[in-house]
Image: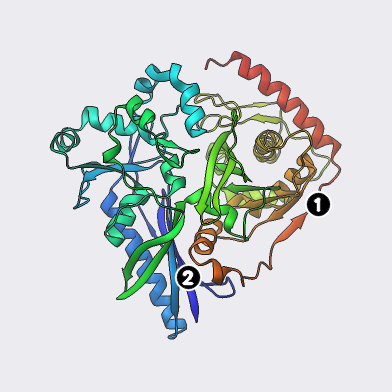
């Protein structure tokens, strides 16, 4: 049996999934990883633990797949990682000099404010705002505060690597970064598809410290797992893989991956020149050239559900069935969702969450879920021009299991919603790594939701937008 192995290194765990020639999961394994938090802004992982967890997950998945089919033949493997996570290491040996500093980390936000006047130029080159979540300010912090990093820089032995490049280096012997992860450093010119000398100078970072940048799909080397040498054929970011889960991304489809946050993407053949208040991102660079995207984010998706369940003292597993069965005549209150801060299109790091109106626990939970749908709609409406329309919206991730959420998104946007296949990041990574194999994959099991008529929902959204505008006017940037 021919198969492909997807490796997905995430914030909470490393996962490995084996897909067969029909796109079915043959085996899957997950190994949890620890996260170290110091206050609100410092978030780290042990890089060696991330690597070990990936090896362990891959070994378990391969053993399980081989036990089920001794004739297992792996065509390729692909790797997806957390974008914006990086570490400093020693050139050659790749020995870590710092922890893996998470994409969630904002430790150098105050320093970054000194460059605020440069934000228009940074946006023009990268498509991204000047944010401490991205790699450049974290690299600067290490240079300013970690003696081992300063010493390596002085001795010419420093290498600064996105997590993806470090994992590729440790797995194959050659650290190379893909475009999706390179772009999240704020040091990569998304038009030139190369490191920017201008941005490196702005942040005081030497281009020689950075790894070579290769295509998303290519010959990265070989990974040895369970005594088997597997060609590594793709490397990308976790969210960048999602649109590939059901074939070649479609510019008239929006892809929404609903996890702790919601990541919203619309593929574009051309680089978006003025993406704000959204993000101009890159999905892939291969033999067909670059494929870009407009990207938005909702911080309070699964995080908002977990926040409400904790505050109400009610298990999530109890809340969801009651939400699905809620009568249409119930009028929930409004929820101004600032859990984790406001992402696009408003970008407020601090925004107090609150309910507007009264209701019991079930009605308030419905308000939280509707706020997620409202925020998704705010982003998607900014992703289409006045003469454009979306053919469909694909929802993936844990929250997409909710029929009620899918129906609300379809109704708000007036577009067909499809609940995508599970394991979107892993499936997309596998498809990137083995496109010939993935062409034969079945996509059965996708459920569609047609737009409905719900005047109450539309009216609630209108009131929610007015309440959000008023709250934003009172919130200091």
For the point 75% across and 31% down, the residue is: 461
Instruction: Name the residue tied to disc 1.
Output: 450
Instruction: Indicate which disc residue 37 carries.
Output: none
Between 82 and 458, the one lying in front of the other is: 82
Determine whether 248 is above or below 459 in the image: below
Graded by Cα atoms within 10 Å as few (under 14), some (14 to 19) or many (20 or more), the crowding at tag 1 reads some
Determine whether 399 is above or below 388 in the image: below
Quarter of the rendering containing residue 266: top right
For the point 64% across and 38% down, the residue is: 372
Quarter of the rendering containing residue 427: bottom right
| Residue 297 visible within the image | yes
List x then y, in percent, for residue 46: 28, 48
Q: Which of label 1 and label 2 is nearer to you?
A: 2
Determine whether 467 is above or below 156 in the image: above
Disc 1 from disc 2: Cα separation: 34 Å
Q: In this view, does 306 lie to the left or right of 377?
A: left
List x then y, in percent, for residue 382: 68, 33
Between 167 and 317, the one lying in front of the other is: 167
Instruction: Name the residue tied to disc 2.
Output: 4
Q: Is residue 2 left or right of residue 88?
A: right
Comes first in the chain, label 1 or label 2: 2
Q: Is mark 1 on a helix, strand or loop?
A: loop
Q: Is residue 379 left or right of residue 179?
A: right
């Amino acid at each position: 049996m021919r198969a492909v192995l997807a490796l997905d290194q995430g914030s909470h765990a490393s996962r490995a999934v084996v897909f067969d020639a029909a796109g079915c999961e043959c085996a899957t394994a997950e190994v949890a990883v620890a996260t170290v938090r110091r206050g609100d802004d410092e978030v780290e992982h042990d890089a060696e633990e991330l690597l070990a967890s990936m090896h362990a997950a891959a070994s378990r998945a391969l053993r399980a797949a081989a036990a089920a089919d001794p004739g297992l033949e792996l065509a390729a493997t692909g790797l997806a990682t957390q974008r914006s996570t990086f570490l400093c290491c020693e050139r050659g040996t790749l020995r870590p000099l710092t922890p893996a500093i998470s994409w969630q980390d904002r430790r150098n936000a105050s320093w970054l404010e000194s460059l605020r006047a440069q934000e228009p130029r940074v946006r023009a080159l990268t498509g991204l705002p000047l944010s401490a979540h991205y790699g450049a300010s974290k690299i600067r912090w290490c240079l300013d505060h970690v003696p081992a990093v300063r010493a390596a820089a002085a001795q010419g032995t420093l290498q600064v690597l996105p997590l993806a490049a470090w994992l590729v280096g440790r797995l194959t012997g050659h650290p190379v970064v893909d475009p999706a992860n390179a772009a999240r450093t704020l040091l990569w010119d998304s038009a030139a598809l190369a490191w920017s000398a201008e941005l490196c100078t702005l942040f005081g970072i030497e281009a020689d410290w950075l790894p070579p940048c290769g295509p998303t799909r290519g010959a990265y080397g070989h990974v040895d797992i369970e005594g088997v040498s597997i060609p590594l054929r793709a490397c990308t970011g976790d969210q960048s893989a999602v649109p590939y889960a059901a074939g070649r991304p479609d510019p008239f489809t929006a892809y929404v991956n609903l996890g702790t946050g919601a990541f919203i993407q619309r593929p574009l053949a051309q680089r978006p020149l003025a993406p704000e208040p959204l993000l101009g991102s890159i999905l892939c660079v291969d033999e067909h050239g670059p494929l870009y995207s407009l990207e938005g984010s909702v911080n309070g998706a699964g995080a908002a559900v977990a926040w409400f369940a904790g505050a109400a003292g009610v298990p999530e597993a109890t809340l969801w069935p009651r939400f699905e069965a809620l009568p249409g005549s119930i009028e929930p209150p409004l929820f101004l969702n600032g859990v984790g801060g406001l992402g696009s299109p408003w970008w407020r790091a601090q925004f107090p969450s609150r309910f507007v109106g009264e209701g019991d626990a079930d009605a308030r939970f419905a308000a939280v879920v509707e706020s997620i749908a409202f925020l998704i709609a705010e982003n998607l409406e900014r992703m289409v021009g006045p003469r454009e329309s979306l053919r469909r919206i694909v929802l993936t991730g844990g929250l997409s299991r909710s029929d009620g959420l899918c129906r609300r998104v379809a109704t708000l946007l007036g577009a067909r919603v499809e609940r995508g296949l599970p394991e979107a990041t892993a499936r997309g990574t596998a498809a990137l790594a083995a496109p010939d194999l993935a062409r034969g994959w079945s996509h059965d099991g996708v459920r569609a939701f047609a737009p409905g008529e719900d005047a109450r929902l539309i009216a609630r959204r209108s009131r929610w937008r007015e309440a959000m505008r008023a709250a934003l006017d009172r919130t200091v940037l």
